[in-house]
Image (spheres, rainbow, N blue to C red):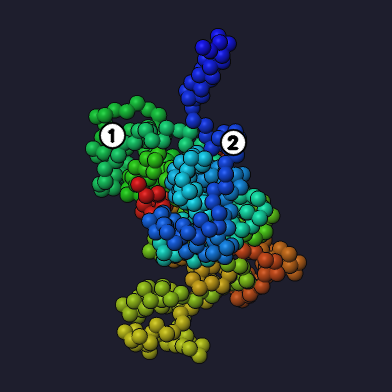
Amino acid sequence: MRSPSCLIVLLCLFLITGCKNDQEEPGIEQRNEVEEVRDLTDSGEIEDFFDDQPEEEKKIYNIQLVKGFYKENDYEPVWNNRDLREDLFRNIESIEEEGLFYEDYHGEELQKLLRSLDTNTEEENNLLEILLTDSFIQLSQDLATGKLNPKEIYEIWGTPLNQVDPTALLKKAISDSNIDEALESLKPKHIVYQGLKNALKEFKKTDWRNAPATKIKDGKLIKPGESNERIFSVTKRLSELGYYKGSIDSTNTKFNDSIQKALKKFQKDHDLQIDALLGNATIKNLNFTKEDRLHQLLINMERWRWYPRDLGDHYIIVNIPNYELSVVKDNDTIRTHKTMVGTDVRKTPIFSDEIDYIIYNPTWTIPPTIKKNDVIPGARRDAGYLKRKNLNVYDGSGNMLDPATIDWSSSKALSYTYRQPAGPSNPLGVVKIIYPNEYLIYLHDTPSKKLFENNARAESSGCVRVQDALGLAEYLINDQDKYDSKKIDDILKSRKTTQIALTQKVHVHHFYWTAFQKKDTIKFIDDIYDLDSNLWELLKPEA
């Protein structure tokens, strides 16, 4: 017979055991703090995994890279170190801060396997080892180069792709015992990207899933003062977006002054033409929901992963849809200029280059597209076309030709050079800034300066027109004392075409982003080339 004291001890043990069973299952870090887990696997098991687990191999995104990595390292495991695997998983847990998706990096399966390390089968821990390596490789590639290849999506994308050797980076991360530092080194550091990260964080605090979004139907253009049954939907949508402050009359169909005023403010904020006209572009932007805008942030973060990481210490950056050029030196914005960019038919391409020289009093050599689509058809239709446009024609030897002697229906007309001399009517204005590139694109002045007053300025044939291009050019050669303001003024007055080489190194980057943080607000602007459309379908994780 047991003594009373023995029964008390047994009762206490029973109660302690019962309390443990009622406790919540510890997480990954809690579990590993209270018990040391055996090594995940060894080299023999990893080699066997690749030989014996063809079905499990289907889960691996980068199977050839993963196999090559382990073969090169004699199939030695790399994730037996608890701190390393937890550091990697923490990066995966927080990856949505970078606009990427937890599920793209085996997130759920890793979480499950990491929580049951001490009860996993040998095969499960082998799989965990392989999945961790595959996740690192996939994550490093996506952070460095983006999930998608822009050259496969956009015809106008010329910026070279970033490069990363994910297996070499993994070896370094393991050797340095620092997963965080390795992955952090791949992320864009530019202030616009950081602003998008902040904007995404703030945006997710809002109720973006359930925000009201009245849909405006398509239809013909609505002009100020006109009546249309869609005016109620327009008014309601402007109210939802915070632009219309008055009471909404469901019976009103007239596009009145108060609705026009609200619409103009919306158009201004989204870099649309401020004309109070309800056309396709304005209605498209009004119809974007908060969820659409969240996707727009993610799309623009993806684009920043496509851009070069090192833009240089001194550079010009042109944000095409924002119609703005900024000069940045030592991370400080020195000056900004309004721009005009290519129309939707003749888009300004996205690429990077370096400024070579400046030309004052430039002649204008007609680029191939304009020559083929505009000049030759114009000359074919009208014998006086070239004279009115002040265009001269030259053969391959540089001899000027008489337009009356040219057979405009022959293919030979395409082989000639068409050039407009320097002068007040020259579409390049009085200066152009050259960075030789395959697209024949450059920055230049324009005689049509009034167009800079427009809010939407997709007006050019592909090149970038710059407001106060003379001021920008003078800035670019301000390290050359002989070209002071008086000297430049003398060159301009001479009407003589003059080329000046740059002696300072300045890069030019044509980029494209339609969302950014401006002070304490998130600014969404018109996607003038429809580069955002359908991109979300390619970018989003599989259901």
Q: Would you say the residues marked 2 and 1 are in contact, meaning their CB atoms lie under 8 Å apart?
A: no
Q: Which disc number belongs to residue 232?
A: 1
Q: Residue at x 51, y 42 (%)?
A: 117
Q: Which disc number belongs to residue 35?
A: 2
Q: Residues within 10 Å of mark 1 (few under 14, many from 20)?
A: many
Q: Earlier in the sequence, mark 2 or mark 1?
A: 2
Q: Residue at x 76, y 66 (%)?
A: 481
Residue 310: x and y in percent read 62, 59
Which of these two is toward me, 62 or 237?
62
Residue 231: x and y in percent read 28, 37
* Relative side of 74 to 24, left or right: right
Under mark 1, the amino acid is Phe
The answer to whether residue 434 of the structure is visible from this angle is: yes
Q: Where 331 sits versus 355, above or below?
A: above
Q: Residue most toward the front?
A: 1
Dot 2: what SS?
loop
